[in-house]
């Protein structure tokens, strides 16, 4: 009996994620793009085209979930129409895999979608936990049991760091297998050069550009970030560039009180992040928790060292004293001192920056991470094939 290995043929993969600005959506859409470039057929299922989704890319399709506005519902429901769309796309396109990013509500919707389908049309479900789906929602009694159930029912669960794997185990009490597959980044070449971007931002050659890119949610602790920046010696020339995926307004008063508002440049909903990454000298992240911190990785690819809090999965990304400087959470003295050290020392910035670039390419490139997902999908289908072969009383099941 010969069995053809499932990974030898292109797969049909459904991907669901939050389409808005955020690490999980960015990873999901980049993963989809990379898989399509490798010959797989990719179907995105979401309420909007994901941030960084490319229209018209070969083998890439988008299926919109329509959200209802029934008068009876005080709050519109997304989970049920999402699960119906998942089951429709699975059966119409014979999906092999349904890969959901961020457990709530995607994993629950996927499990429900699978229940609606006859066995021969059921895709294998892969759930990737990204961070707050475990660390925040997992602790919420209104969500935790549903997340646990969806993980138990998934065919595979992955986490984006070892930290998140351990948290998912302890917070959710999930003791099934979880594979750590780190986040990755595949930078596009910037359209303009570093000098032009800095000139457009009004940043002089001798000024240090400190970059922070996030949705500015509470967990990012922008209050600590501003306090740390305010510790930089006033005679040092610097600008803080915030690529904001959320409103800065709640922090404006604080920045004014600290006397640093004239040093801050805010850019909202930036799509071409590479333009800014290439122009930055230091990346700054003061989060309370962070399962990985994709933004730090994005900066590393452009040879930019970081100052960050030693929380969550950040130490798996940044090597303290080699690719950046880590400080305890909420320790403004330590964060300010680390920042000051890098602001003052150009050689140190360059040394850390080069080490950061090398580490990013070596450990977190698409070339090293995408095959890990392909292997996971392939193994699920091979295992599935073996199971079906047994069920069919040793009849050979071909995948091609
Ligand atoms: O917190 C964010 O910035 C958004 C959030 C998301 O789900 O989109 O990010 C989480 O997933 C990213 C991609 O895997 C990780 O890099 C972030 O660390 C993680 N955020 C947190 O854990 C707070």
Image (cartoon, helix red, strand yellow):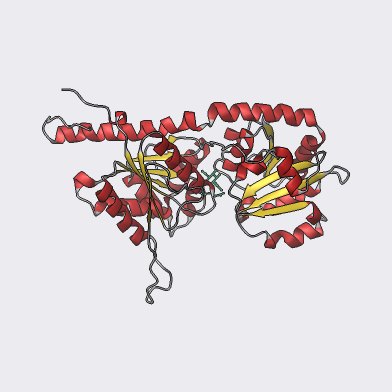
Residue 70 x %, y % = 37, 73
Numbered disc total: 0
At horizontal 31% and vertical 51% (from top left) the residue drawn is 111
Which residue is nearer to you in this view: 92 or 260? 92
Which quarter of the picture shows residue 352? top right
In the rendered image, the vertical position of residue 89 relative to residue 77, given as above or below: above
Q: Furthest-top residue in view?
A: 1
Residue 47 visible to the viewer: yes
Which quarter of the picture shows residue 42? top left
Which residue is nearer to you in this view: 288 or 340? 340
Which residue is nearer to you in this view: 54 or 340? 54
At horizontal 73% and vertical 29% (from top left) the residue drawn is 350
* Residue 349 falls left or right of residue 33: right
Residue 228 visible to the viewer: no
Q: Furthest-bottom residue in view?
A: 71
In which quadrant will I find the C terminus?
A: top left
In the rendered image, the vertical position of residue 193 relative to residue 75, given as above or below: above
In which quadrant will I find the N terminus?
A: top left
Residue 214 x %, y % = 61, 50
At horizontal 59% and vertical 36% (from top left) the residue drawn is 189
* Residue 89 falls left or right of residue 249: left
* Residue 228 falls left or right of residue 80: right
Which quarter of the picture shows residue 293? top right
Residue 120 x %, y % = 19, 44
Residue 276 x %, y % = 66, 43
Q: Furthest-right residue in view?
A: 235
At horizontal 49% and vertical 45% (from top left) the residue drawn is 130
* Residue 81 falls left or right of residue 246: left
């Amino acid at each position: 009996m010969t069995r053809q290995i499932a990974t030898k043929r292109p797969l049909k993969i459904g991907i669901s994620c939050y389409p808005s600005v955020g690490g999980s959506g960015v990873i999901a859409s980049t993963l989809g793009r990379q898989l399509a470039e490798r010959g797989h057929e990719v179907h995105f299922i979401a309420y909007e085209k994901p941030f960084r989704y490319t229209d018209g890319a070969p083998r890439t399709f988008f299926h919109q979930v329509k959200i209802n506005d029934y008068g009876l519902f005080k709050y519109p429901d997304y989970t049920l129409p999402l699960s119906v769309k998942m089951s429709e796309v699975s059966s119409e396109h014979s999906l092999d895999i349904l890969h959901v990013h961020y457990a709530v509500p995607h994993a629950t919707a996927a499990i429900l979608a699978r229940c609606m389908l006859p066995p021969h049309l059921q895709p294998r479900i892969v759930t990737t936990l990204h961070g707050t789906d475990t660390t925040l929602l997992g602790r919420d009694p209104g969500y935790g049991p549903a997340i646990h159930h969806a993980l138990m029912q998934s065919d595979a669960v992955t986490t984006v760091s070892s930290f998140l794997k351990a948290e998912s185990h302890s917070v959710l009490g999930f003791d099934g297998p979880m594979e750590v597959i780190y986040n990755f980044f595949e930078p596009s070449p910037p359209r303009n050069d570093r000098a032009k971007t800095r000139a457009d931002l009004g940043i002089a050659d001798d000024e240090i550009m400190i970059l922070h890119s996030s949705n500015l949610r509470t967990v990012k602790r922008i209050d600590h970030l501003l306090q740390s920046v305010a510790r930089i010696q006033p005679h040092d020339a610097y600008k803080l560039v915030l690529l904001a995926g959320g409103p800065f307004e709640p922090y404006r008063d604080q920045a004014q009180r600290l006397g640093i508002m004239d040093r801050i440049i805010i850019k909202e909903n930036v799509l071409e992040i590479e333009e800014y990454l290439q122009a930055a000298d230091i990346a700054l992240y003061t989060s309370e928790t962070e399962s990985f911190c994709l933004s730090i990785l994005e900066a590393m690819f452009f040879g930019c060292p970081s100052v960050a809090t030693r929380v969550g999965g950040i130490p798996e990304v940044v090597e303290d004293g080699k690719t950046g400087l880590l400080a305890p959470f909420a320790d403004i003295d330590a964060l300010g001192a680390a920042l000051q050290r890098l602001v003052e020392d150009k050689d140190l910035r360059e040394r850390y920056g080069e080490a950061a670039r090398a580490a990013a390419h070596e450990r977190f490139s698409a070339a090293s991470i995408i095959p890990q997902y392909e292997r996971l999908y392939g193994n699920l289908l091979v295992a599935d094939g073996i199971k079906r072969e047994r069920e069919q009383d040793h009849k050979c099941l071909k995948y091609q």
